[in-house]
Amino acid sequence: MSGDGTSERSGRRSEERAQPPAEQARSGAQPTSMSGEEPATVNGDANTTGGNGSGTAKLRSARSIVWARRRAALAGFWRLYRVQGAGMAGLGILVAITLITLLAPLYSDESELRASNAPGGRMESPSTEFWFGTDQVGRSILTMVIWGARVSLQVGLVAALLAVTLGTLIGMAAAHFGGWISWLLMRLTDWFIVLPNLVLAIALVIALGPSKVTIIVAIALTSWASTARVVRAQTMAIEGRPYLERAQALGAGHWHQMTRHVLPNLMPLVLASATLQVSSAILAEASLSFLGLGGPEMSWGTILERAFSAGAISVGAWWYMLPPGLAILLVVLAFTLCGRAMEVVLNPRLRGN
Amino acid sequence: MSGDATNERSGRQSEERAQPPAEQARNGARPENMNDGTAAPMLSARDLAVQFTAPGGRVARAVDGVNLDLRPGEILALAGESGCGKTTLARTLLGLERPTAGTVSYGGSALRYSTKALKRYRRAVQLVLQDPTGALNPRHTVYDAVAEGLRIHRVHDNERDRVADALSRAGLRPPEKFFLTYPHELSGGQRQRVVIAGALVLEPQIIIADEPVASLDASVRGEILALIMRLRDELGLAAIVVTHDLGLAWNIADRIAVMYLGRIVEEGPVDRVLTEPRHPYTRALVSVLPNSPVPEPVVLSGEPPDATEVPGGCRFHPRCQVLASGLAEQAGVADACRRTDLPVLSAETRRPPDTAGDPGQSAAGDTGSRVACHYAHATTASPA
């Protein structure tokens, strides 16, 4: 991490050195200032002060101004993200896995996942035809892992999204409204935090009946609480800032304050937390599936469960267990790397040494 | 007020305002105040009180009986030390704080606290905060910050032109250059101009500025103050400027209200109050200014006031230098100082014709300065 910080910093410096002195004085304060909250620093500068002539010509309408700002913000984010090796590696893995998963129908045949249509023999060890061998009915493990990725990733992403949305809403409401609403929401949050997640998820899945949707709901319901805590704390910090008082004095209602000021400032935190949440949701899905609570669709957890019940360990069929396990490891690692890198970009205190 | 008079007035003011108080008093009268007492107040507070419950169940009387009037085109300074309730008063006037007792009225009708009524009120009365860095959302561009008021009040036509107009009125020219800038790319003075532009964009009647220049350095201060005065002259804005700096009040305000522990202790035309302070607290504040009309600097002893324990009698008496030196005893009011509560200063219902005073004139009661002090009442013939 320290290496990354240094290279990033020197990169910045060289950029700044190229600017004329006056310009530099203006941007000099940026790396230490609030710029972390504001990813579009150096780029924004180039846009507004440097490229003034071309910049003002385009600013005809409110909409073009908004878009120009968003482009600058995105470019700034990417510039800071790009220099982080680990984050880029995670992103590369994710892109590769997404492509492999999405393009699966083009190079493999889903019908081969049906036991009646299995192409190989029972428990074949890896060969050139079946890279990861076959299972107890002769299906290719590689094909199973590739198609299993669809379910695992889907469940992971949707559950994480749900959990973070729920946590953010509850956290913001608890911080904003205060009083008994806050008390009630926070006791609820505490309750969900102290409950053992897996046990609650198992109970939920059993009560609702195993399926993909059930698993998503169970994971989301058991993992929103920590997000709510963090979001509440951050919302309270943001609400103490004078610009909220200014907005209030301008006549802004709750909705405006929340959507225009609090939420945008929460976004970095929420995004990073969502990315990390995906990892734990994928793990939770694998655990539930491994315990036999998965739906009929094949996911990585389901493959592991089948390998276990088919006695892959006693047969010594390592090729049955390892590929789905490694796939889980790889995806969780990739999401964690991306999440950490995003945290570093969006939170200046984590940057450099 | 005719155009000529305005011009003449601002011209004279700019010359005279640079001078320290005592100097000016010697040179003669300050120009007449714009408000001659005929205009009805735009914003007024009656018996306003705001209480907070401090931890432990103690009640802090942050504002404890305030009457205040603001007339069109008038700049009123609200002065006092930290913790005297001036910011709370400003927030209450804005409707950000609900008064425990009393009323705020705007345009003659009492302010209602329904969401709708407040929103309408806030189009007309705008706030400028002390710290422009904190008052601007770091993720919003200057354009967004200024356009925010328009968006809140759903003014969608000509948004861009309105924003550009407000920015150039606030002295950021050419406005297009600042549209995409973020607050951290601006200097402190520019940020405060953005905040002011954000207030101006809604074409308000009144601006309430809470220590508008306290966080700015001296070179920028003058510019921002000049801006506020220019806005008054050009747009007829009325303003309440909260400040702890009497020099600032002198430079900018028409009237001044000095607050101590939740009450206004002295109130009147700024030249009158600052050249002939009557309340011991005001005298102490004025005495430490350069070229002060009070010969000896007065350093207040005692503890800074605590709004949870307002002393009985005159609330200033534990720190009062007049009482401590025995002057109050000689005037025969020492007992009253310690025991008798002072009435809340009434807002002026009628202002005596402002003769712009002969500085030598000693009877201060007749020029519109009003004071809440037993000693001052006893030593001048007519209690104000």
Image (cartoon, grey):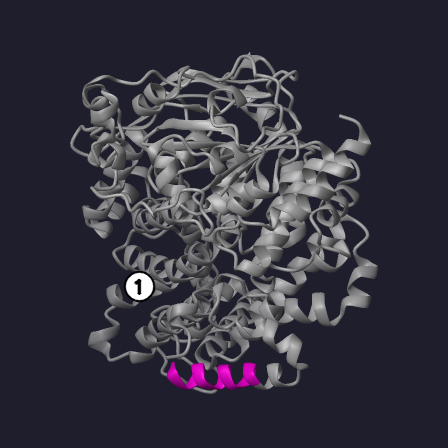
Q: Is residue B139 above or below residue A352?
A: above
Q: Amino acid at mark 1?
A: Arg
The quadrant the N terminus of chain A occupies is: bottom left
Question: Is residue B356 rendered to the left or right of residue A5?
Answer: right
Question: Is residue A325 rendered to the left or right of residue B206?
Answer: left
Residue in the foreground of this view, choosing between A168 and B93: B93
What is the x, y in percent for residue A129? 49, 83
Question: In the image, what residue occupies the spot 65% across and 81% down?
Answer: A21
Question: Is residue A229 rendered to the left or right of residue A29?
Answer: left
What is the x, y in percent for residue B16? 64, 46
Q: Tell which subunit mark 1 falls on.
A: A
What is the x, y in percent for residue A111? 52, 62
Q: Which residue is mark 1?
A: A306
Question: In the image, what residue occupies the spot 76% across and 48% down?
Answer: B164
| Residue A260 seen in the current view | yes
Residue in the foreground of this view, choosing between B173 and B289: B289
The quadrant the C terminus of chain A occupies is: bottom left
| Residue A166 seen in the current view | no
Question: In the image, what residue occupies the spot 26% across and 34% down?
Answer: B320
Q: Is residue A7 magenta?
A: yes
Question: In the image, what residue occupies the spot 33% across and 51% down?
Answer: A230
Q: Which residues are magenta?
A: A1-13
* Count of residue discs: 1
Residue in the foreground of this view, choosing between B307 and B218: B218
What is the x, y in percent for residue A253? 52, 32
